[in-house]
């Protein structure tokens, strides 16, 4: 099953590159983009939930409803923080903050493992290489001129934390859903709330933009469903470690399609991440 999260890392890389292209070339309003993207995700998943729907009765217990509600709230907070930071700061300057998410996931998973048995790994042969890989990833993105801890950078860090917290909390109730039904319900709630908050003008997005966003939404469905599947079957930390292959794919795709240079620090971090993954698999 190790190939499944690798596909997830590839999907994350492709989705990130396509999203960057759309936002850069189409110059679409971020609020409109967010609403359209969640709408695209819902549309893509509508035919899938007929075949993969799962909703156990335990999901309706008060504790689990509160957890699901927390997931939605933290997801919205994360999206709003990222929107706030991206609107007023250059994306390249925010990269070190955004790349903190895997480390936050690992740290939170370790903390939650002391309170919830059998849901989060305690295996040091997975935890240690995951932390090393996350540290290598972060260090490869840190640039002295970009470390300006203004309110926008701090908002991006907070956004990464809330995305990580949302993912960790999701694991507590994932067993009551299929990955597809859980993601569908999560995105439906976020879409409705985003629509109410932003009230975007859909006419400002032409047909080509909508088709591109629909494609990106399809890729995000693949990515998140694989992440949830990995959490259930492979473990949160191990799945996060494999997903850290995504930046390697991003470097490659950005070099090929966006003509961006691959720096030595990126190559070194890629080698470290690959070595950590091989160790975790073979250990």
Image: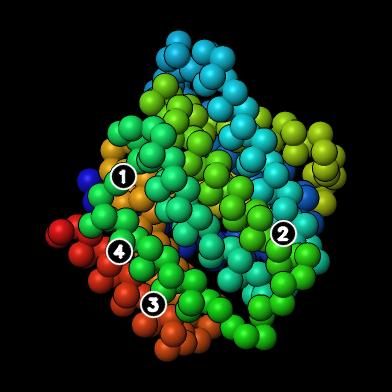
Residue 212, relative to residue 202: is it above or below?
below
- Badge 1 crowding class, 10 Å Cα cut-off, few under 14, some 14 to 19, many 20 or more, is many
Mark 3 residue element? helix
Residue at mark 4: 129
Q: Which residue is mark 2?
A: 155
Foreground tag (2 vs 3): 2
Q: Nearer the viewer, mark 1 or mark 3?
A: 1
Q: Which mark is residue 93?
A: none
Residue at 64% over, 75% down: 92
Q: Is residue 265 visible?
A: yes
Q: CA distance from mark 2 to mark 1?
A: 29 Å
Callout 3 crowding tier (Cα within 10 Å): few <14, some 14–19, many ≥20: many
Mark 1–mark 3 distance (CA, rounded to whole Å) = 24 Å
The percent position of residue 73, horizontal first and vertical second, equals: 67, 35
Comparing 196 with 233, the one in front is 233
C-alpha span from label 4 to label 2: 28 Å
Question: Mark 2 and 3 residues: CB-CB less than 8 Å, in contact?
Answer: no
| Local secondary structure at mark 2 | helix
Instruction: Count neighbours of disc 2 (C-alpha within 10 A) and say few if under 14, some if 14 to 19, many if 20 or more.
Output: many
Q: Is residue 215 left or right of residue 137?
A: right
Residues marked 1 and 4 touching at CB (< 8 Å): no
- Tell me the tag on residue 121: 1
| Residue 207 in view (yes/no) | no
The answer to whether the residue labelled 3 contacts the one labelled 4, judged by CB atoms less than 8 Å apart, is: no
Q: Quadrant of residue 23 in the image?
A: bottom right
* Residue 205 x %, y %: 76, 52
Work out which quarter of the rendered image holds the C terminus and state it: bottom left
Residue beneath the point at 36% across and 82% down:
268
4 or 2: tag closer to the N-terminus = 4
Q: For residue 269, which numbered disc appears in the image?
A: 3
**Disc 4 secondary structure class:** helix
Q: Earlier in the sequence, mark 3 or mark 4?
A: 4
């Amino acid at each position: 099953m190790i190939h499944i999260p690798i596909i997830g890392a590839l999907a994350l890389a492709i989705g990130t590159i396509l999203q960057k292209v759309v936002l850069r070339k189409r110059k679409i309003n971020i609020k409109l983009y967010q609403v359209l993207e969640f709408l695209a995700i819902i549309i893509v998943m509508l035919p899938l939930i007929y075949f993969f729907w799962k909703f156990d009765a335990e999901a309706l217990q008060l504790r689990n409803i509160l957890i699901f509600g927390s997931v939605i709230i933290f997801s919205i907070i994360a999206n709003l923080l990222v929107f706030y930071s991206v609107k007023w700061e250059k994306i390249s300057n925010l990269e070190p903050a955004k790349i903190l998410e895997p480390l936050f996931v690992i740290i939170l998973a370790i903390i939650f493992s002391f309170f919830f048995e059998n849901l989060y790994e305690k295996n040091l042969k997975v935890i240690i290489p995951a932390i090393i890989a996350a540290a290598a990833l972060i260090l490869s993105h840190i640039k002295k001129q970009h470390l300006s801890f203004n309110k926008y950078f701090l908002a991006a860090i907070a956004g990464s934390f809330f995305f990580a917290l949302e993912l960790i909390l999701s694991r507590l109730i994932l067993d009551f859903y299929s990955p597809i039904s859980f993601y569908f319900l999560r995105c439906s709630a976020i879409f409705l709330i985003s629509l109410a908050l932003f009230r975007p003008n859909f006419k400002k997005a032409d047909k080509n933009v909508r088709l591109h966003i629909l494609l990106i939404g399809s890729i995000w469905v693949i990515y998140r469903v694989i992440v949830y599947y990995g959490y259930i079957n492979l473990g949160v930390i191990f799945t996060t470690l494999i997903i850290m292959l995504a930046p390697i794919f991003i470097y490659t795709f950005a070099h090929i399609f966006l003509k961006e240079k691959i720096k030595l620090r990126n190559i070194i971090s890629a080698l470290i991440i690959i070595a950590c993954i091989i160790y975790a698999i073979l250990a």
